[in-house]
Amino acid sequence: MTILVTGATGFVMANLVRHLAEAGHDVVAVDLNPPDAALRQFLGGQRGAVEFHQVDVTDRAGVHALIGGIRPDRAVHGAAITAIPPDAERRRFVETASVNVIGTLNVVSALADAGTRRIVAISSGSVYGRRNNLTPIAEEDGKDPRALYPMTKWAGDMLARRFAEVHGLSLAVARLASPFGPFERDTGSRPLLSPIAYWAGAASRGESVVVAGDASDERDAIYAPDIASGITTMLLADRLPHDAYNVGWGRGASAKDTVAAIGRIIPGMKVEWRPDEPSPWFSPTNVPRGPLEIERLQSDLGWRPRFDLDSGLAAYIEWLREARRVAS
């Protein structure tokens, strides 16, 4: 079948495109930005073909023309401006809201007109917001987004599901835990990378790993290929009993735990603990929370993550080393 993926040159969606193409599906990869040589190599040579198209999701006419011409069987809408630090939030406030909310409606409405049989819209675990404890968070738990990105993701999440209900579409949102893995980079919409990208990158280059803030703070990290397989399970299921699914590992890991796991892969790495410096990943609007509960995706659709923290980090560090070797 032909599958359309928006945001396809971004981090998580690039891993999804590769996962789908490896399985033999033909993928129409759509993004505002064209793929560079490294991404073409990452996505090339698979069983399924990958065809690239450029479009701005805020351009309603352009989106409808592109999707109407392709008429994909199934689609994943992942185009977004992702988690941003306060200075970028101020500069790109209206742009972020336009891409994440209006862009979502433009894409979903175009897919409805094209007769697409299944749509997965990418949401975020950040929509659950502030929590007083680190207990796992289920899909029906309360939402409390505190900053622009989670607010716009929650708006897109609600509107996509309501649009599908009104129009009789088979659509579900995938609320993602904190991803790390191949091709995490800033393509113009992701200025703040994950802490694991910085820590694993520094360790693999023989540099000191700098850990600011409270090393006991937890994140529910997940290796990007596991996110790709979770989304694919939703996309290809015969039916979707629910319209929202968390995609994660179902457990959290502190900075201390994560750095220790990297140290088991790269013995002798240097670590600088800076507890008095603020962590860029935690703020009054981006605070520690419990891991996303994944029982619904497991019980409804039979999905299980393939990696754990150690094996995911090992695979990622191996990818970083190979990418650096090819680049040199």
Image (tube, grey):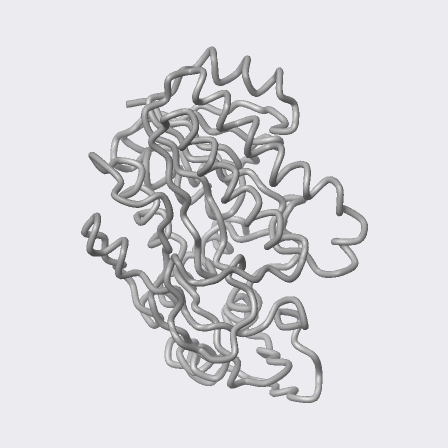
Percent coordinates x, y for residue 12 in the rendering? 47, 47
Q: In front: 144, or 317? A: 144
Image coordinates of residue 323 in percent, x first then y, are 48, 52
Vertical comparison of 114 with 95: above or below: above
Quarter of image, res 83 = bottom right
**Residue 110 higher or lower than 204, as above or below:** above
The residue at 39%/58% (across/down) is 140
Above-or-below relation of 58 to 135: above
Left or right: residue 300 versus residue 207 is left
Residue at the front extreme of this rendering? 166
Out of 198 and 255, give the one closest to the viewer: 255
| x then y, percent, for residue 288 | 54, 74
Identify which residue is drawn at 62% across, 52% down: 151
How many numbered marks have been drawn onto this rendered protein structure?
A: 0
Q: Percent x, y for residue 188?
A: 67, 44
- Residue at 57%, 35% in the rendered image: 36
Q: Which quadrant, please, contains the N terminus? A: top left
Q: Is residue 58 left or right of residue 227?
A: right
**In the drawing, does residue 139 fall left or right of residue 300?**
right
Q: 328 and 145: which one is in front?
A: 145
